[in-house]
Image (tube, helix red, strand yellow):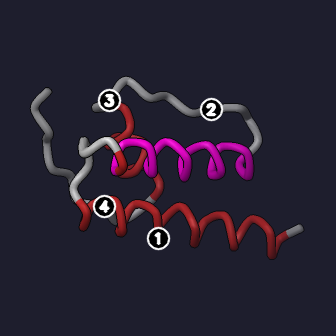
């Protein structure tokens, strides 16, 4: 599989990154979406399919969004 590099600046970019691997995350619950995205990103990184810098950036974006969601509750 060829890895296509994306600019990772927001959640949409993380979703597009996951789509490269045929991973589509949507439960309708933003918190659950973020938790699953974190898991999927880690699995991709651990399997060597995701570069370290992209994993770190994508995980930070998802973590930031998850923290924001939790603060709003």
Quarter of the figure with residue 25: top right
Residue under label 2: 26
Q: Do labels 3 and 4 touch, CB within 8 Å?
A: no
> What label sits on residue 21 in the rendered view?
3
Say which quadrant the C terminus sits in: bottom right
Q: Which residues are magenta?
A: 30-45
Query: Which of 32 and 49 lies nearest the eye of the viewer?
Result: 49
The Cα–Cα distance between marks 4 and 2, rounded to whole angstroms, is 19 Å
Sooner in the amino-acid sequence: mark 2 or mark 3: 3
Q: Secondary structure at mark 4?
A: loop
> What label sits on residue 8 in the rendered view?
4
Q: Measuring 80% from the left and 68% from the top, which residue is drawn there?
A: 70
Comparing labels 4 and 1, the label whose residue is closer to the camera: 1
Q: Residues within 10 Å of mark 2 (few under 14, many from 20)?
A: few
Q: Residues within 10 Å of mark 3 (few under 14, many from 20)?
A: some
Comparing labels 1 and 2, the label whose residue is closer to the camera: 1
Q: Residues within 10 Å of mark 1 (few under 14, many from 20)?
A: some
Say which quadrant the N terminus sits in: top left
Comparing labels 3 and 4, the label whose residue is closer to the camera: 3
């Amino acid at each position: 599989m060829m890895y296509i590099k994306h600019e990772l600046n927001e959640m949409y970019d993380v979703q597009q990154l996951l789509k490269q691997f045929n991973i589509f995350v949507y439960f309708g619950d933003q918190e659950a979406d973020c938790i699953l995205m974190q898991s999927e990103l880690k699995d991709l990184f651990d399997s060597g399919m995701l570069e370290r810098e992209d994993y770190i950036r994508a995980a930070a974006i998802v973590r930031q969004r998850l923290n924001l969601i939790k603060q709003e509750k």
